[in-house]
Image: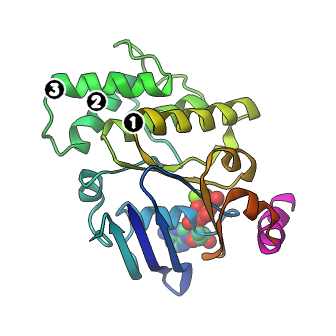
Amino acid sequence: MLSVAGLTKRFGGFTAVKDVSFSVEEGEILGLIGPNGSGKSTTFNCVAGLLTPSAGSIRLEGREIGGERADRVCHRGIGRTFQIPRPFRNLTLIENVALSAYFGQDGKVGRTECWRQAEEALHLVGLPFALQFSTEGLGAAALKKLELARALATQPRLLLADESLNGLDQAEMANAADMLRRIRTEKGLTIVWVEHIMGVLMRVADRVVVLDHGEVIFSGRPAEAQADRRVIEVYLGAEEA
Ligand SMILES: Nc1ncnc2c1ncn2[C@@H]1O[C@H](COP(=O)(O)OP(=O)(O)OP(=O)(O)O)[C@@H](O)[C@H]1O
Ligand SMILES: [Mg+2]
């Protein structure tokens, strides 16, 4: 479904992502992991059109999308969450999500259907969809759910979730993991999930790609990753430090 080849992103003289290649099969959950600053969000933002790659190719179902604008990438069927949620605070929960449904589908879907899709997305993530609920007082876990609902409302075929669940406690992390798996099944989605905590992701990912200093150091099954010497050194070593 998605194929990234030789992706490189430089910020001035600093190379944040270096010759990264991986692919995502339809229906799978791919975990993109690595320590803080290893280039996960940058890779993500290149795929989602927020950043223009310095080099390399990004193909969605065979079609080059590298360098395309974020809204166009979204209209092509890639939904994404942001690591730092920034909802419209002056709008209610369901208004936030309905806006995503509307603009995420290029304004081609009518008002009633947008509200229905917003309701469905909020229901999927387990947030209240009654009209009066505001974003006020939402905790870290609920804000992440809202972020996910906004991405789902754009009706993606491929979901990029920049989760980084480090703001959540163990139970909330496990819930988030179960939720993604359920959403994959219910909506028939393909998911790329970014995370720097290994444990949770290992339970839900079909495959993992491990980044370190902007480079792929491992690609394969979660169980193999956990036994890989380089991953243990670089990744688990960094986590313990
Ligand atoms: N716009 C930017 N300009 C300059 N440097 C940047 C920019 N965005 C990211 N970087 C740098 O690129 C590197 C990779 O950052 P990135 O945000 O992709 O890491 P990450 O793997 O998502 O980390 P985290 O787990 O903390 O979210 C970091 O060293 C970061 O400081
Ligand atoms: Mg990040």
- The residue positioned 54% from the left and 25% from the top of the image is 138
Q: For mark 3, does the 10 Å Cα neighbourhood hold few (<14), some (14 to 19), or many (20 or more) residues? A: some
Residue 227: % across, % down = 82, 64
Structural distance between the alpha carbons of marks 3 and 1 = 22 Å
| Label annotation for residue 26 | none
Give the mark, 2 or 1, whose residue is nearer the N terminus: 2
Question: Does the image show residue 92?
Answer: no
Residue 21: % across, % down = 50, 76
Give the mark, 2 or 3, whose residue is nearer the N terminus: 2
Question: Mark 3 = which residue?
Answer: 111
Q: Quadrant of the N terminus?
A: bottom left
Instruction: Determine contact: label 2, label 3, CB under 8 Å.
Output: no
Which quadrant of the figure has residue 107?
Answer: top left
Question: Mark 1 = which residue?
Answer: 187
- The residue positioned 55% from the left and 28% from the top of the image is 142
Question: Mark 2 = which residue?
Answer: 98
* Secondary structure state at the residue bearing disc 2: helix
**Mark 2 or mark 1, whichever is nearer to me:** 1
Queried whether the magenta region covers residue 14, the answer comes back as: no
Question: Does the image show residue 61?
Answer: yes
Magenta region, residue range = 229-241
**Mark 3 or mark 1, whichever is nearer to me:** 1
Structural distance between the alpha carbons of marks 2 and 1 = 18 Å
Queried whether the magenta region covers residue 239, the answer comes back as: yes
Q: Amino acid at mark 1?
A: Lys
Asked if ligand 2 lies within 8 A of label 3, the reply is no
Left or right position of 130 against 240:
left
* Secondary structure state at the residue bearing disc 1: helix
Q: For mark 2, does the 10 Å Cα neighbourhood hold few (<14), some (14 to 19), or many (20 or more) residues? A: many
Q: Is residue 232 above or below residue 84?
A: below
Structural distance between the alpha carbons of marks 2 and 3 = 8 Å
